[in-house]
Amino acid sequence: MIADLHTVPGFTFNGFSVGLKEDNQLDLAIIHAEKPCAAAAAFTRNLVVAEPVKVCKKQMEDGLIQTVVINSKNANACTGEVGMKAVYEEIKRTSVVFKVAKKDVFISSTGVIGRPFPITEVLNGITLAMDGLENTAESSHATAEAIMTTDTKPKGASLQFELNGKTIHFGGIAKGSGMIHPDMGTMLSFIISDLNIKAEVLKKALNKAVDRSFNMISIDGDTSTNDTVLVLANGDAKNDLIDSIEHPDYAKVEEQLTEICIKLGQSIVDDGEGITKMITFEVQGLPTEEECRKIIRTLSTSLLVKTAFFGKDPNWGRLFAAAGRAGVDFDPDKADLFMGDNDELCLLKSGQPKTLDENLAHQILAKRDVKVKFDFHQGEAKSIGWGSDLSYDYVKINAEYTT
Amino acid sequence: MIADLHTVPGFTFNGFSVGLKEDNQLDLAIIHAEKPCAAAAAFTRNLVVAEPVKVCKKQMEDGLIQTVVINSKNANACTGEVGMKAVYEEIKRTSVVFKVAKKDVFISSTGVIGRPFPITEVLNGITLAMDGLENTAESSHATAEAIMTTDTKPKGASLQFELNGKTIHFGGIAKGSGMIHPDMGTMLSFIISDLNIKAEVLKKALNKAVDRSFNMISIDGDTSTNDTVLVLANGDAKNDLIDSIEHPDYAKVEEQLTEICIKLGQSIVDDGEGITKMITFEVQGLPTEEECRKIIRTLSTSLLVKTAFFGKDPNWGRLFAAAGRAGVDFDPDKADLFMGDNDELCLLKSGQPKTLDENLAHQILAKRDVKVKFDFHQGEAKSIGWGSDLSYDYVKINAEYTT
């Protein structure tokens, strides 16, 4: 049971079946706050952008959101003026049904693109949802389930921390399995909180958190038209208002928001299409964090690296060659490469292969979770990211799925 | 029968079995010119570079090469000082056996990396080859076969053209199937010619040709430690010496060298690991050729695009979303997308999907060769590139192969 939203007071939510998916599966989710919340969002950087993303970039301008409507099955992307009009109709209906300002409504869609948007079903669903919102474990689970597309299970995470004696709650859900990549790929995540924070400061914390979490996960390197991460904070925790990044409590908030984003990001990789391995990439010893990240992104998207992990092959050659084409300047003769939770298997020392301990390699690669670490010994920065292997099932799922 | 080297006078060559591969398969190739040739090479841009590449960058400095020795099975990469010493021993032995200057020897290796280089077998092979070089259809075929690794067949191409009444011959061989990508990936190609040209001018023509051929093909996006394209020109055609890019015959030479590089590049994609589709990507209507190329590279390396072609799905959504994340600025609402040899299937018009002609789509995608064309209507530049689909067999081959 994904019951993570349920941990946060002041919000109600649920998932509904409105006839977009077959067999009465849940396909519409609504998250509603008792009052307008400080809100921050990060969107896809793809140039080809879905209609709700275009509209909601404007909805975010005053930093306030109260009600969020998300449908799965149809992405409302490449749908032109008709699709755009549908978003405004959703906003209007939500405003009427939930008695919120139109400017405080957030709309999100995920699913196939370029198909006419089923506006009638969605509008009926919004009306239907009026009396169906709750703050329960069941409604949290249903909300997470209603935003799924090729996901095999609902995904959520929650955490709590203290700020000067006040307990702060974060609860979040996420979806996305294919098209997962550093710039976010058919990936949606909604995080709610009782934190008391200014929207503009929340936005800064979210940018940092996304860069170190959702932007460091990769399944297939593709990004989508609809990716969105939204955070709402209703202030109910009554902590001292965090009104700037200089506020003494800001650092803790950024850290904890990053933490929940990492948990949600990991849950997406872990449910990646057809994966048999979840790989944690650590890169250290370069002058800048961005250089470390570039190498992680190249490693985690390399088909040869991914198929080697599927084959349980401790293939340092493919890892090293992928690092070498990342566009980062380093001296290969200083590079060390390790595998294993505690770096127990050294594969390369100063750029030269070590004699392979086949038993140890077999033990490490038999597990679902594998850690890989490069240390370039040419600087102080480090970064961490997450990827997966590439299996027959990935090909099968994506050869058969129609966008 | 690959008999393309055979069309060029003034060279002898052959492939030999020296015990690197199992079952007496050919594993050592030698191409020898009667006299030192004007030579130009393009190498991998990977930072992790094989020992023979390090050495041969220096060998190219005076622009003269007479004898080329290529072994398959072992890449002599990540082999450190011992591997480096082996390259110099190969050069010395070749110099003695073929009575050529050490500075005019070129060494190339391909195969697994990080394994001790079998120097004894290779040196014995060079000696053994002394009396085995010929200029015949059979020896041309054997040369192409000896440089294969995961290739399923030898690859070659040839062409002839006239320059002021003189006939110029180009003959080339190539290898490489996995790790094929824009920056060249475990890809070797050797082209011989009787053209009369200065080495520095040949280098300029080769750079242009490689940018429009080998750098525009992609199977899996990975590049390798050993990639090399080498062109030798012995001058026997006795055309007026092409001594600068202003020479009236230069443009024709650049065009024809590009042509043979495209043929060789296509033969590599066509033999790509586990491919069932060969895709030609045309992009036009952007301000610069480099922008067109960036989009082609993103399309041809997108896993979602590749698996869609394997599934014979006319998936304009994945193509459009991949174009959108290529890092090129364009207005999606002006984009047209077509499939088919004559652009007969229009999938997107001004950024909006067209009603799909399923019969026509089925016909087009049933073929092995599929053309995809984007027209962005935002400029005059265009580019062309080649890619493949991603099949179960790709995963199988690469999960089971050890670098």
Image: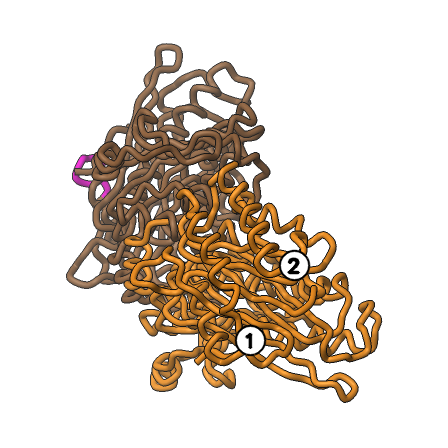
Chain colours: A orange, B brown
- At label 2, the amino acid type is Val
Q: Which residue is mark 1?
A: A5
Mark carried by residue A100: 2
Q: Which residues are magenta?
A: B133-140
Q: Residues within 10 Å of mark 1 (few under 14, many from 20)?
A: many
Q: Are marks 2 and 1 on the same chain?
A: yes
Query: Disc 2 vs disc 1: which is toward the camera?
Result: 2
Q: Is residue B391 above or below residue A392?
A: above
From the top left corner, tell me how far across and down residue B374 is, in percent: 44, 32
Horizontal arrangement in the rendering, residue B248 relative to residue B112 (left or right): right
Left or right? Give the position of B97 relative to A1.
left
Residue B119 — which label?
Answer: none
B107, above or below A192, in the image: above
Q: Quadrant of the C terminus of chain B?
A: bottom left
Q: Amino acid at mark 1?
A: Leu
Q: Tell me which numbered mark, 2 or 1, is placed earlier along the sequence.
A: 1
Question: In the structure shown, which secondary structural element does the residue marked by tag 1 occupy?
Answer: helix
Q: Please report the residue visible at 35 percent of the width from the left and 63 percent of the height from the top.
A: B112
At horizontal 69% and vertical 81% (from top left) the residue drawn is: A168
